[in-house]
Amino acid sequence: MKLPEHLAARTIVTIATQRSGTKAFAQSLNSGEVVRSAYEIFLPNNPVASLTRAWAAHLGAHPDFGFSQDELTAFLDEFLIKLHESIDRDYLHFDVMYDNLGVLNTLWTYPIGLPWRNFLMGYMRSRGLLVVHLIRDDILECFASNIIAQTRNLYHTDKDISQREEEPITLDLDRALHYVLPVARTRGLVREAFRDQRRYIELTYPDFIAGDHIAPAAVDALAQALSLSPEAARGLFGPIRMRPTAPDKRRLIANYDEVAAHIAPALAQLAEPRLQRW
């Protein structure tokens, strides 16, 4: 069964890389009254809905699955229909991380990073899902935040830990470069994939957060994209319990400026205008 248009219109997908405010955004939606967030649906242990578990079950039940465009589309349609049926609100939200975008593909797919060859983004476009692209301008901040979280074994918190005394961390220059370049490339691919789409908005982290709430401009952008009334828009988001785990990266990273200088030329080259491919 094809995903009905009224359900597609009520489906919100956040696309982002890790450490870009996705959990705070989803938590604030769940604290509101309009949208139910399933968070990251590709996590196998997601208690609300796991696309990974559903995919494994589907393949087990269909041993002759051919990985065609139609078969993959039908699987996702069925998954989203069931997910809508399981939630207690009219609108559904979930996260798709940059490194999830290559998970589902047709059998005959070139291993190249072109947006129109990506099945998941093509599905989102074809069904008219609302795509919210969360951007963290300084990609090095994403890498530093990830390393700090790994070092502390602390990825999210509802407590203020900004003044905790810690030994500074020294980042590996090449590891930083290998982290930021794929993120930068994928950001460009997502923008290219949705640049002509009406149901696409970008929000910048941490600017879309104001204290313990989503900033008014971000609320207005999402409400307008969903065509919500002013009354409904007031219930779109609720409070955010999460707190920044490492707001002062330069205090915690001993060689932050050195790493920034090391990766800057590669990022600048990546940002240069490209000629037409063919």
Image (tube, rainbow, N blue to C red):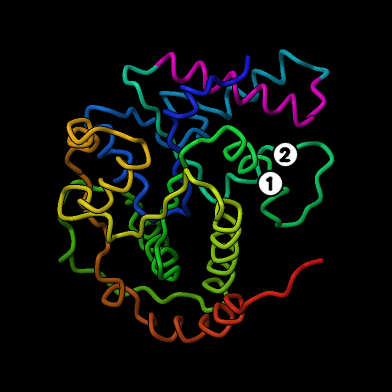
Say what secondary structure mark 1 lies in.
Answer: loop
- Horizontally, residue 278 falls left or right of residue 205, namely right
Q: Give percent across and percent down for residue 100.
A: 58, 44
**218 vs 104, nearest the viewer:** 218
The structure residue drawn at horizontal position 66% and vertical position 46%, both measured from the top left corner, is 102
Question: Alpha-carbon distance for marks 1 and 2?
Answer: 7 Å
**262 vs 111, nearest the viewer:** 111
Query: Which segment did they paint magenta?
Result: 65-86
In reply to whether residue 256 is colored magenta, the answer given is no
The structure residue drawn at horizontal position 52% and vertical position 80%, both measured from the top left corner, is 263
Disc 1 crowd, CA 10 A, few/some/many (<14, 14-19, 20+): many
Where does label 1 land, which residue?
Answer: 118
The structure residue drawn at horizontal position 25% and vertical position 39%, both measured from the top left corner, is 28
The first of marks 1 and 2 along the sequence is: 2
Residue 109 falls in image quadrant: top right
**258 vs 210, nearest the viewer:** 210
Q: Give percent across and percent down for residue 184.
A: 55, 66
The quadrant of the rendering that contains the N terminus is top right
Residue type, label 1: Asn
Q: Give percent across and percent down for residue 103.
A: 65, 41
Give yes or no for contact between labels 1 and 2 (Cβ–Cβ under 8 Å).
Answer: yes
The structure residue drawn at horizontal position 56% and vertical position 85%, both measured from the top left corner, is 265
Where does label 2 land, which residue?
Answer: 105
In the depicted structure, whether residue 8 falls above or below residue 130: above
In the depicted structure, whether residue 11 falls above or below residue 64: below
- Mostly what secondary structure, the magenta segment? helix
Residue type, label 2: Asn
